[in-house]
Amino acid sequence: QVHLAESGGGLVQAGGSLRLSCTASGRTSSTNDMGWFRQGPGKKREFVAAIRWNGVVRYYADSVKGRFTISRDNAKATLYLQMNTLKPEDTAVYYCAASKTRGATLTTAGVYDYWGQGTQVTVSS
């Protein structure tokens, strides 16, 4: 089993930055491709960004492209999401997720096997 724990959320003004972290524990050898999703108030959970197991290939939602950067440190079993130029519409609970496999379409929540509890990000205008 794998446990994912997010941290780094908080309250920030529009235009500010935050860096989210997601640390995996347990059977971390089972975590391959990973991603970030978010769920805003009254909205469905949506894809934000994803990264392949080797850290080379990355994917972003159009809404965050150019502002957010996903990265990982496999030695530390940690996933990151650097969020710059934040907007009020980025307000959401952010979840990290990990897949036991490699090569799936990472924009779909159903391909992930493990999820964190989420961290709240609030952007004030």
Image (tube, rainbow, N blue to C red):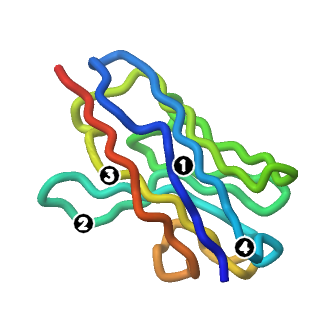
Mark 4 vs mark 1: which is more N-terminal?
A: 4
Quarter residue 51 falls in: bottom right
Q: Amino acid at mark 2?
A: Lys
Q: Amino acid at mark 4?
A: Gly
Spatial separation of the CA atoms under disc 4 and disc 3: 24 Å
Q: Amino acid at mark 3?
A: Val
| Residue identified by numbered label 3 | 93
| Residue identified by numbered label 4 | 26
Q: Is residue 64 left or right of residue 33?
A: left
Residues at circles 4 and 3 in contact by the CB criterion of under 8 Å:
no
Mark 4 vs mark 3: which is more N-terminal?
A: 4
Q: Is residue 82 left or right of residue 48?
A: right
x, y percent for residue 113: 58, 81
Residues at circles 4 and 2 in contact by the CB criterion of under 8 Å:
no
Residue density around tag 1, few if under 14, some if 14–19, many if 20 or more, within 10 Å: many
| Residue identified by numbered label 2 | 44
Kind of element beneath mark 2: loop
Residue at the limit of the structure toward the left, as seen here: 42
From the image, which quarter does the C terminus lie in?
top left
Q: Is residue 77 left or right of residue 109?
A: right
Q: Single out the mark in the foreground, 2 or 3.
A: 3
Residues at circles 2 and 3 in contact by the CB criterion of under 8 Å:
no
Spatial separation of the CA atoms under disc 2 and disc 3: 11 Å
Residue at the limit of the structure toward the front, as seen here: 26
The answer to whether 29 is drawn above or below residue 121 in the figure is below
Mark 2 vs mark 3: which is more N-terminal?
A: 2
Spatial separation of the CA atoms under disc 4 and disc 2: 29 Å
Q: Single out the mark in the foreground, 1 or 3.
A: 3
The answer to whether 5 is drawn above or below residue 84 in the figure is below
Q: Is residue 62 visible?
A: yes
Q: Amino acid at mark 1?
A: Tyr
